Amino acid sequence: MKLKSAGVIAALIMAGTTNANANILFDIYAGATVGVGAETMFAGHDNDTTSAQAYGAVIGLDIPFVRGEIEYNYLDGKDIDLHLGMVSVYAKMPTPMIQPYIGAGIGTIFDGKIKDAHNIDIDADMAYQAMLGVTFNLPIMPLKIDAEARALYIQDVYKIDGATPDMLHYDARVKLRYIF
């Protein structure tokens, strides 16, 4: 009788220590990103490329084949600073340890500044992005690491003296996500 009681108690303890999300079909997460790359400004036939860094924060919902995110991005370039809000959707392979994915997003600039003698503010404008990457699932821990290539496009990012250049920002990013 004592052996049965010990087995039941051990089973209850083990059941209580498993991941709370083990039987749920989706994961809610929050995370942070950091990236390095370049930005190119296109104005007519002229273009100018400079280095840039990207930083961000995300919250999202991860289900077996699709992942959705709301993200904040700060782009720090040589000539321009931007704060963006984006909504992105990712299609992913449901493999256990390493998951390739592709994604797209749409959003807006909600604050920005051109860092030159004019120190001009940038108005709100639409932004579009595409991502290609891979997720590394860490066993036992509630963390996932994403390594991705990203391209961000903004049409007519600012207007100075009649010039309205488009901007293409591309970078390599690392994203750390904590699963709740």
Image (tube, helix red, strand yellow):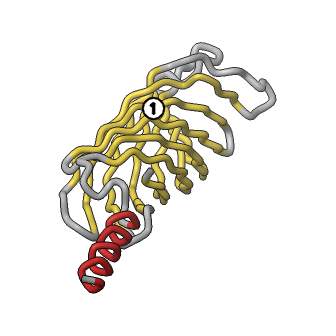
Query: Please, is residue 75 above or below residue 145 in the view?
Result: above
Res 161 quadrant in image? top right
Residue 59 showing in the rendered view: yes
Q: Which residue is mark 1?
A: 86
Tell me residue 96's x, y (percent): 23, 67
Identity, as a three-letter code, of the amino acid under mark 1: Met
In the image: residue 78, left or right of residue 162: right
**179 or 110, which lies in front?**
179
| Secondary element at tag 1 | strand
Res 114 quadrant in image? top right
Identify the residue at image location x=58%, y=22%: 110
Q: Name the residue furthest bottom.
A: 3
Res 17 quadrant in image? bottom left
Identify the residue at image location x=33%, y=39%: 68
In the image: residue 20, left or right of residue 123: left
In the image: residue 145, left or right of residue 164: left
**15 or 132, which lies in front?**
15
Q: Name the residue furthest right.
A: 117
Classify mark 1: residues with Cα within 10 Å, few (<14), some (14-19) or many (20+).
many
